[in-house]
Image (spheres, rainbow, N blue to C red):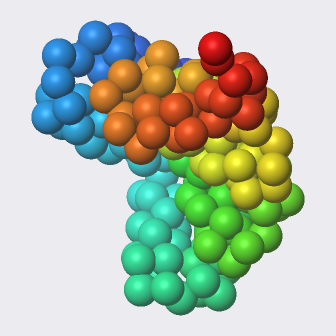
Amino acid sequence: MVSHPALAQDGSAEDLLSQLAQAEDARAAERLERQLRQEWSKSGSAAMDLLLKRGQDALDVDNVEAAMEHLTALTDHAPDFAEGWHALALVYYRADMFGPAADALERTLALNPDHFGALRGLGAIFEQVDKPHLAYDAYSRVLSLRPHDSDVIEALERLERQVNGQTL
């Protein structure tokens, strides 16, 4: 049986999320984000952790096919491991498979509602498919979790007129 710390949101992950939301600057936020991603990447199974690493490594060198094989195997064997779904979503997105990517991100968020990477990914997909209101909502949720995300701040500014209309 695989343990799922991302699902349980153990004390250290909750503490890191709280610290991240209150981070004083981008540098502190980056350090906390790295620690949080490290926590989220622990499945509780050496074999599942290896599949995640192999999938991520394959994606890092643009071997989308190998990444998809490793990460599909991971989600098949550990369907309650949120980070596996998030990694698979990245592969689908890289392959321009926006529907499956969005489905995998939704699965990630069902398992870990505070997964800012999944929210950010949904925002990007919603922008790609011309759904600015949904993109704006997803990005707003990201900003509540990680207030120093300059890319998300820019995205919200870019979408502001479309979503809230022109200001006088």
- 25 versus 129 height, above or below: above
- Count numbered badges in the picture: 0
Q: Quadrant of the C terminus?
A: top right
Considering every residue shown, the one lying at the far front of the view is: 168
| Residue 72 at x, y percent in the picture | 71, 68
- 153 versus 9 height, above or below: below
- 50 versus 89 height, above or below: below
Relative to residue 50, is residue 168 drawn left or right? right
Instruction: Say which residue appears at 66% left-offset and 58% top-offset.
Output: 89
Relative to residue 128, is residue 148 drawn left or right? left
Instruction: Say which residue appears at 49% left-offset and 77% top-offset.
Output: 59
| Residue 68 at x, y percent in the picture | 66, 76
Instruction: Say which residue appears at 82% left-offset and 42% top-offset.
Output: 131
Instruction: Say which residue appears at 30% left-offset and 36% top-offset.
Output: 33
| Residue 95 at x, y percent in the picture | 69, 77
Say which quarter of the image contains residue 39: top left
Considering every residue shown, the one lying at the far right of the view is: 99
Asked whether 16 or 96 is in front, the reply is 96
Say which quarter of the image contains residue 15: top left
Say which quarter of the image contains residue 24: top left
| Residue 38 at x, y percent in the picture | 32, 44
- 129 versus 142 height, above or below: below
Relative to residue 26, is residue 48 drawn left or right? right
Q: Quadrant of the N terminus?
A: top right
Residue 98 appears in the figure: yes
Residue 136 appears in the figure: no
